Image (cartoon, rainbow, N blue to C red):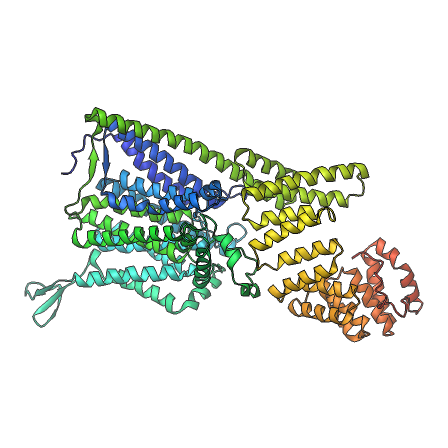
Amino acid sequence: MPLQQPPTHPSLEGISIWALIVTLVVGVFAFIPSAAVPFSTTKTFLLAAGALITFAVYILARLSRGNIILPPLVLVGALWLPVIAYTLSAAFSGVPFTNTFWGTAFEPDTLGFMFIAAGLGTLAALVLRRPEHYRLFLRVGAFVFGFVTLLEVCAVVVGQFASNLIPPTFSILGSFDDLAFFLGLGVVSVLITLRFLELQTRIRRGLLVSGAASLFLLALANSMVVWVLIALVALGLFVEAVMRRRPKAVDADFDGAVTTGDISLEMDEGSHSLILPITALAVSLFFLIGGTLGGALASAFHMNVLNVRPSWQSTLSVAHRSYATAPIFGTGPDTFGIEWLKYRDASLNSTVFWNTDFSTGIGFIPTSFVTTGIVGAIAWILFLGLLVILGLRMLILRAPEDAFIRYAAILSFVGSLYLFAIAIFDVPNAIILTFAFVFAGFFISTTRFAVRGQQWGVVFSRSPRLGFVIVFSLTILLLVSVIAAYALVERSIAMTQLANAGAAFSAGNLDVADQAAQDSISFAPNAAAYQIEAGVAAARLGSIAASSTMPAAVAQQTFQATLSAGINAALTATQLAPLDYQNWLVLGNLYAQAVPLGYNSAKTAYEKAQALDPTDPQIPYILAQLDIANKDTVAAESDLKAAIALKQDYTPAIFLLSQLEVKDGNVKDALATALAAAYFTPNDPNILFQVGILRAAENDYADAVTALSGAVTANPQFANARYFLAAVYAKQGDLKDALTQMQAIAALSTDNATAVATQLTALEAGKDPFPVNFFSLSIAPPVKP
């Protein structure tokens, strides 16, 4: 028997509803144009804060009213299945719990975010309980959709004329793809609303304009998955509308029907029109079939947006190999990037994305399959399966009798399926994923109005014993929410300071970066902050080594203190995040500052990084540089060949190998290696310079002139290239061009003019100032590069 509700408490009841709505609205519009405040992290923090506030107000409302009212509990429990899977994975995967809960910056694939999303979805099911609540939620949603659409259209228009002020690809939601996901939800909602609701003409026109503007923006984004989902919804609505057109016998007094024989079909007007779904279907198919048309339209509006993710094949390959080592609970939340580096295909090194560290797979839910293992896969399948099966059963067999509630149930059900489909086939950000859970919670709330549906509750104010247990439990939950709020604020400040440290470090402001990193650590120790501290130490070591004004004793003491502090910071980073290869690289870089004493420690750190990222050609290249510093050219050549084997066009390794071969007197092999590097980067002045010198050493002066002239053209300030070019001209007997190059060198700086004064005088006198065996002696030019 349905619970008889006591009189409402308008204050707390209303506040809880508005707290939920404001949380979602703020999550959409929150935007601080500063690199010091991370965009996605800010939105996630506000969602978490809003969830805690809503939860606290909801508890106070229940305590004040003395009851708890719940919708059917099966889907509410299903909503928490992914959270349970993430909890088990965090507990048993072996990854530090702090990393699995918070991630680096509140990433979606973390236990903490899943708590936020499931919590907001549950609150939507609990707080939105009456038709008037649904109306308020949908009315605010319509205004938000319309305003976002207007704002983004203005951004596109203004961006065509003032891209420095606002880029045309600006998105208040995050990325332009996230905007497309949101607008697709809006278009779907408009189609359902106009199909099932009778609206005032003004409201109807407003929705039509917003829908049309959204389709224009979707054409610019040209997201295939959004077009497919809109097409499926439009097709479903079209079929539903056709099936509901009722045949009637001909009535002579009825002149508003199209007759065929003695059967007529009612004209389907107003909300039952076929025009809107068939139009949306046609537009979707137009861009799906003519896929290049969307790209051409985006180019015309200067809006080329690149969305790069691993393919299905790559994602499944990583999952297969990860399951071999961690099948049950997965590798741990927020660890896909680690698994990607370990198992990615080396053939990707031949693409432009060879040095891209992907943190997710093809979609959010497939990524979760990797990080939470079989437990996570089962949880997602059960949750989505229950949502689809119970939802369809409710809408087909037990649909609410009230037309508006039936419309709200259809909209929330289709909207949640749309968003979870996005999560399967793409990687939406935190706000889009939160909407998926909230729409699922909204639908769960409407199931209480299904035919033979019930809502359940307990009036604990009438039962002292039960009341004590429930009041005590709710009070504990309220206190937990306060503690969680404190931890959330603390972590948010730490991440903001971390962002400040990263921005300052990138700008070369080492003192500010160091202080911000220390502030971040003081609020919440994290590996990224320690990594920045280690990087600051490495940069300071370089400055100390290059200083010519610091007394030797002071320099040595400062160097040792800085090196020690940097190593301690890097070691702490490796302890907090031992699976992050970049922490080991930073540690190796610091040990490398003290070669030969630090050689073994540096090599060990680099090899650990290489074990975590075995297909990265940069790591064996760094090992080769370490070996060269340790005067072990044989090991260096081996490392360089390993780097080139991983990436055949890795020109830094090719160029360095060529230099080592020159040192060994192997000019022919050095020339072949340098030519290979020049093939991949034909306009690199350093490589052209190397080719020119080696050509000249082989007495191939004509090709030497070509290579050295190319180096000078690529970099007119390249004094060394001009110097050797002058020498080649002199050996060819072209003293005039040799003189021209020497004069150009002298004009670059007074130091260079002094350095080449002798050669310049000789050339002006018509003499060759270079020895006969100049190139075979490998004489370094006396000018500054």
Up the image or down, 34 lies above or below 265; here it is: above
Quarter of the image where one finds residue 569: top right
Up the image or down, 343 lies above or below 648; here it is: above
Q: Quadrant of the N terminus?
A: top left
The one of 463 and 280 positioned closer to us in this rendering: 463
Left or right for 673, reference 288: right
Give residue 619's position: percent from left, percent from top.
Answer: 63, 56
Give residue 559's position: percent from left, percent from top.
Answer: 73, 40
* Residue 411 visible to an observer of this rendering: yes
Give residue 551's position: percent from left, percent from top.
Answer: 81, 38
Q: Quadrant of the C terminus?
A: bottom right
Quarter of the image where one finds residue 311: bottom left
Left or right for 699, reference 498: right
* Residue 153 visible to an observer of this rendering: no
The one of 327 and 30 positioned closer to us in this rendering: 327
The one of 671 and 712 positioned closer to us in this rendering: 671
**Residue at the limit of the structure toward the top, as seen here:** 464
Left or right for 207, reference 130: right
Up the image or down, 98 lies above or below 774; here it is: above
Seen at 18% across and 30% down, the residue is 6
**Residue at the limit of the structure toward the left, as seen here:** 252
Give the number of callouts. 0
Seen at 62% across and 57% down, the residue is 618
The one of 498 and 269 positioned closer to us in this rendering: 498
Give residue 427's position: percent from left, percent from top.
Answer: 42, 54
